[in-house]
Image (cartoon, helix red, strand yellow):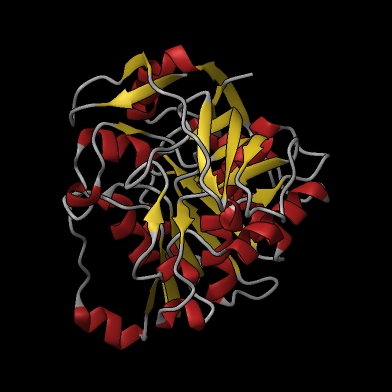
Amino acid sequence: MKAAVLHEFKQPLAIERTSDPKPGETEVLIQVEACGVCHSDLHIADGDWPQFTPIVKRPLILGHEVVGRIIDKGMGVSSMQIGDRVGMPWIYWTCGECEPCQEGNENLCVRQSITGVSVDGGFAELFRAPASHVLKIPQKLSSSEAAPLFCAGVTVYRALKHSDILPRQRLAVFGVGGLGHMAVQIGRELGADVTAVDLSERKLEQAKSLGASAVINAATTDAGRQLRKEGGVHVALVTSAAKAAYDAAFQSLRPAGTLLVVGLPAENICFPPIMMASKEVRIRASAVGTRDDIAQVLAMAEAGKIRCLVSIRELDQANEVLQELRSGEVPGRLILSLN
């Protein structure tokens, strides 16, 4: 099969032929139709997440927003059939036995395997996956539309769901790219009054078309100060990997506001404890989502409540796609098509 393979950090992916994977007894073999390209793929390829570096398999096929059709399966698989169109998220496998799994937080499984990190991902024509952890794709959704829901969609959905934001409360989304433009829509569906913050006028115009009631260009306006002058926000969700976005988001919070940590800068971030205490600020992180979360996001998309804006590229363009992500100007999500 053809695949885009990472051999060394900070080096271009190699577009090459590799051996076809074979499904084990409880696995399925998927002919990949689409795979989203996430900023996490860029961080992994560049090796700039030191906490992840020790678990990155090499050589490695990147990609954790994988959608395609099952073309083979193991003898022990009865839940899926040949021809089913399915998707696989960041979390490749969970044990089901540790405390987080038993508590309904399988996304925090202490023994989890990670797609496109510790096991090969979807930047390839074929992909092997545990049948227990793939999800069927609603017929109404194309493979390219569905793929980003398995990371971008579910990540911001879980973060907002756990923020307990209420209708008519104020939500600021810092960074309206692949994750952020989904957060704008999900916030709108939750009844929040959404303000989108970004450096790109193109992205801000897109955010308005998706339901943002206001936008702030952080290149020309101090977003934290502006939002604070307007009373502050109940929830600030940061999808950007920029430290400056976190600083502005923290400043934007009203008393008892919640900062949602979704974007992952390579550098550490910190906030003044006296300001945290005096405003009783809550800081809550969110790690992708569970299979139940993904099913809920797919149902929202099937009902037409949210949609991911996608741009299609070919597998041979994988390195060019990563470079596009480095530019920070990508609206929506880039997709590698393998049809």
Q: Quadrant of the rendered structure where residue 70 is?
A: top right
- Between 95 and 172, the one nearer to me in the picture: 95
Report x, y in % for residue 184.
Answer: 61, 51
Report x, y in % for residue 82.
Answer: 73, 38
Report x, y in % for residue 248.
Answer: 33, 57
Residue at 19% across, 39% down: 47
Report x, y in % for residue 232.
Answer: 47, 70
- Between 93 and 266, the one nearer to me in the picture: 93
Q: Quadrant of the rendered structure where residue 48 is?
A: top left
Position of the C terminus by quadrant = top right
The reply to whether residue 85 is in sight is yes
Q: Residue furthest front?
A: 75
Q: Is residue 129 above or below residue 14?
A: below
Residue at 44% across, 12% down: 316
Residue at 63% across, 49% down: 75
Residue at 38% across, 47% down: 240
The reply to whether residue 178 is in sight is no
